[in-house]
Image (cartoon, rainbow, N blue to C red):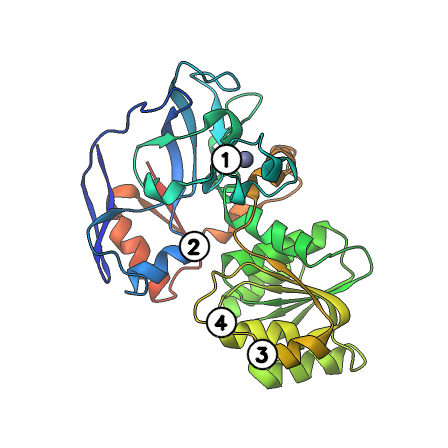
Amino acid sequence: MKGAVLYGPRDVRFVEREDPRIIEPTDAILRISATCVCGSDLWPYRGIDAPRQPIPMGHEYCGVVEEIGSEVRNVRPGQFVVGSFFASDNTCPICRAGYQSRCVDARIMGAEGAQAPFLRVPLADGTLVPTPELPPDDLLPSLLATSDVLGTGWFAADAAAVAPGKTVAVVGDGAVGLLGVLSAKQMGAERIILMSRHEDRQKLGREFGATDIVTERGDEGVARIKDMTDGLGAHSVIEAVGTQQSMMQAIRSTRPGGHVGYVGVSHGVSLPGEELFFAEVHLMGGPAPVRRYLPELIGMVLDGKINPGKVFDQTVPLEQVAEGYRAMDERRAIKTLLTV
Ligand SMILES: [Zn+2]
């Protein structure tokens, strides 16, 4: 088969790769229905954490089970499934507590390379969630979104303790930030302030439930949030970027006693202890345990309650994966769906 491989900075190629096969008896092989490019794929693409050798790319996926190992019980060939970007056993104490992304046996799906027509999924029983029947094609983008971006936005909102009546601020207007808005809306937030300076993203944010837009960043952005909240700050703040500036903007926008849910992959962030001490805010975040939320999120998509697939504003065939990366790198696209 052919799939996406990163050779070096800004050099993604659609090249011949080994067909995935069952290695462990707990594996499943999927025929991918749709996959996509993640904002976090752009870090290695831009040469940050650059690989020393060519690596397969992609960790967001949904598809039909093609083959299962001898110990797989919960899914069977022919079923449509969605999984998270971490494979997990879903039985260890950490999984049972709801933190499947830190499963004692967690496997990072990026290593398998989901931007391809077929994918090996380790720990299939714990990782994959089947739908009751094969979904119609028009639901594929939204089902694919549950695999990472929606699951991550949902976790961020949950970690930020979003609840009815609360004021939520969202730092970051990428796909995760926008779906953080959607999640906050579903969780009953009263006011949702999206921090964004891009018109197309503001528009989608409003569609997803943002009530206010703040275009200022850094200290000015914090001052705007304070102005809008009687000088107190937001109850809940979602951080979906991962830089020093975005993290401090999130913490400083939160009122004492409030919650920050941070899901932007942290790059060079260092928190000042004294400021943190006096901030008196809750901090919770990390790689989202998407598996915890998948059954509920898939159900909401199948019921037509939410349409997170709207974050895909570009669709290209998998063989044009290089264009997908370029478009997201140049911010021409919020998120690129790859058809297989
Ligand atoms: Zn586990």
Question: Going 50% across and 23% down the picture, which residue do you hit?
Answer: 134
Establish if 134 lies above or below 268.
above
Establish if 99 lies above or below 284.
above
Does the residue tagged 2 have its C-beta within 8 Å of any atom of ligand 1? no
* Amino acid type shown at disc 4: Val
Query: Residue lying furthest top in this view?
Result: 70
Mark earlier in primary sequence (4, 2): 4
Counting from the top left corner in percent of width and height, residue 307 is at 59, 45
Label 1 Cα neighbours within 10 Å, binned few <14 / some 14-19 / many ≥20: many
- Dot 2 falls on a residue whose secondary structure is loop
Counting from the top left corner in percent of width and height, residue 317 is at 30, 43
Q: CA distance from mark 4 to mark 2?
A: 25 Å
Q: Can residue 88 be spotted in the picture?
A: yes
Mark earlier in primary sequence (1, 2): 1
Given contact means CB atoms under 8 Å apart, are the residues at marks 4 and 2 in contact?
no
Of residues 277 and 67, the one nearer the viewer is 277
Mark earlier in primary sequence (3, 1): 1
Q: CA distance from mark 3 to mark 1?
A: 34 Å
User: To which residue does mark 3 refer?
Assistant: 272
User: To which residue does mark 4 refer?
Assistant: 269
Does the residue tagged 4 have its C-beta within 8 Å of any atom of ligand 1? no
Does the residue tagged 1 have its C-beta within 8 Å of any atom of ligand 1? yes
User: To which residue does mark 1 refer?
Assistant: 88
- Dot 1 falls on a residue whose secondary structure is loop
User: To which residue does mark 2 refer?
Assistant: 335
